[in-house]
Image (cartoon, grey):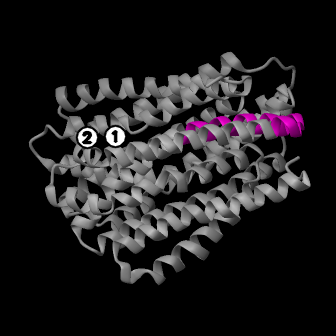
Amino acid sequence: MVLTRSDRHLWRLAWPLMLTNLTVPLLGLVDTAVLGHLDDPQYLGAVAVGANLFSILYWTFGFMRMGTTGLAAQAYGRQDQVGQAALLLRSLLLAIAVGLTLIALQGPLITTGLGLMNPGPDVAALAAEYAAIRIWSAPAVLCQYTLVGWLIGCQLPRGPMVMLIAANSVNILLDVLFVTVLGWNSRGVAMATITAEYFATALGLWLVWQRLPDHRASLKTLLGQLEDYLALIRVNRYLMVRTICLLLALAFFTAQGARQGEVILAANAVLLTFLLVISAGLDGFANAAEALVGQAVGHRSHARFLVACRTAARWSLIGAVIFTALFVLGGHWLIGLLTSIEEVRATARDYLPWLWLLPMAAVWGYLFDGIFIGATRTQDMQNTMLFSSLGVFLPVWWLTTSWGNHGLWFALIALMLARAGSMGAVFLVRTRSGSWF
C-alpha cells in the first residue's frame, strides 16, 4: 500500500497515542502483581475495589481531556499562539478547582462508592484507607487530562506517551519499595500511585512549557474573564453527560450479567476485556482525527476537514478488520490466556460470536467521537448518546430479556450501531450544510 501525505501525518499522530492507550492498564497490573504475592488476599481485594472506584470517578471527568483537545486543535489551526496558552492556563485552573472539590467531598464520595460495591467488612476497611489516600491525586489526574488534551490538540503526541512511561516507571519502583521492602501493603500501593501521578503531572507541565508558542500576552489576558470559563464548562458539560450515559450503560451491562450468575459475569468480563483492547487500538486513530479535524476547523478549510475524516475513516476501518480477524481466528486461544477456569472458558466461547461483531460495530462510534471532539460539536455527542442509550440500548435489552445473556450482548451491539447511525446522520447533515465551521 502506498501511503499518502495525509496517511503519514495521521500515523505520526496515531502511533504514540495507540501505545499510550495500550499501556494505560499497566498501573493496575503492577499493583495487582505486587499485592498478589502477599499472604493475605484482602490487600489485593481492597486495591481492586478502590482502584475500580477511582477508575469510574476519574473516567467521569475524562471530558476534560476531550474538551481541551478540540479547542487546542482549533487554536493551533488558527495559529493563535495566545489562544493556545490561554486555553492551557484556564483548563489547568479548572482542573485544579474540580480536583480540590473532589478532595473536599471525599467522605460522601468514598462512602457511597464503597456502599454500591458492597465488599466484605475487612476489605471495605482497607479499601476505605486506600481511597482516603488515593483521592489526593485528583488535582494531578485532572491536570494530566488537560495536559494530554492540549498536547494532542497541538499535534505533540509523544508527550502523553512520555508522561505515561514515566508514571509507570515511578509506580513500579515505589510499589516494590513501599510494599515489598517497607511492608505498607495496600496503603503503600496508594502512596506509590499518587506519587507517580504527581510526577507525571510535573513532567507534563515541563514538556508543555518547552513547547509553548511565543507570545506577548499579559497574565490578565491569559487568565481571561468569567465568560471564558463558562465557555469551557459548556463544552465539557455536554461531554460529561455523554460519558456518564456510556458508563451507566456499561455498568448496567455488568449488573445484568451478574444477575445471571457468577459464571456469566466472569465470562462477560473476559470478553469485555477485549473491548478495552479494541478501544485502546482504534482510539489512536480517533485521537489523531481530533487533532487534524480541529486544525481544519480552526483553519476554516473544508478540504482539509474532508481529507482528515477520510484518512481517519480508512485506517479505522482497516484496524477494525484486523481486530475482527484476530478474534475470529484466535478467539479461543485469547480466552484461554485470560482464564484457566474451564467453566468460564466454555461459557465465554459460547458468546464469542458477539465479540466477532464488536470491532465493526464499535469503530464508527470511536471515529465520529474523534471528528466531533475536534470540531467541538459536543452537544451532538451528548444528544446521540442519550438517544443510543435510552432510546435503543434499554428498549432492546427489555425486548430481548427472554434471550438471556445473548439478549444482553445484542443490546450492547445495538447501542454501538445506534451511535454509529445517529452520529453518521448528524455528520452528513453538517457536512452538506457546511455547518462544521
> Does dot 2 land on a helix, a strand or a loop?
helix
Disc 1 marks which residue? 28
Along the line of sight, the residue nearer the viewer: 328 or 428: 328
Q: In which quarter of the image is residue 329?
A: top left
Along the line of sight, the residue nearer the viewer: 238 or 57: 238
Q: Is residue 70 left or right of residue 411?
A: right
Question: Is residue 241 positioned above or below 79 on the image?
Answer: below
Q: How many numbered marks does the figure carry?
A: 2
Q: Which amino acid does label 1 sit on?
A: Gly
Pointers 1 and 2 in contact (C-beta within 8 Å) = yes
Q: Distance between the residues labelled 1 and 2?
A: 6 Å
Q: In this view, does 113 lie to the left or right of 239?
A: left
Say which residue appears at 60% left-offset and 49% top-offset.
Answer: 366
Q: What residue type is labelled 2?
A: Thr
Examine the residues drawn in magenta and state their main secondary structure: helix
Please identify the residue farthest to the front as the structure is shown: 1
Residue 72 visible in the shown view: no
The crowd level at tag 1 (other Cα within 10 Å; few <14, some 14-19, many 20+) is some
Along the line of sight, the residue nearer the viewer: 99 or 26: 26
Q: Position of residue 300 (x, y in %)?
A: 90, 38
The magenta-colored residue range is: 282-305
Magenta run includes residue 62: no
Question: Is residue 103 positioned above or below 247 on the image?
Answer: above
Q: Quadrant of residue 421?
A: bottom right
Q: Position of residue 171 (x, y in %)?
A: 35, 29
The quadrant of the image that shows the N terminus is top right
> Does dot 1 land on a helix, a strand or a loop?
helix
Disc 2 marks which residue? 32
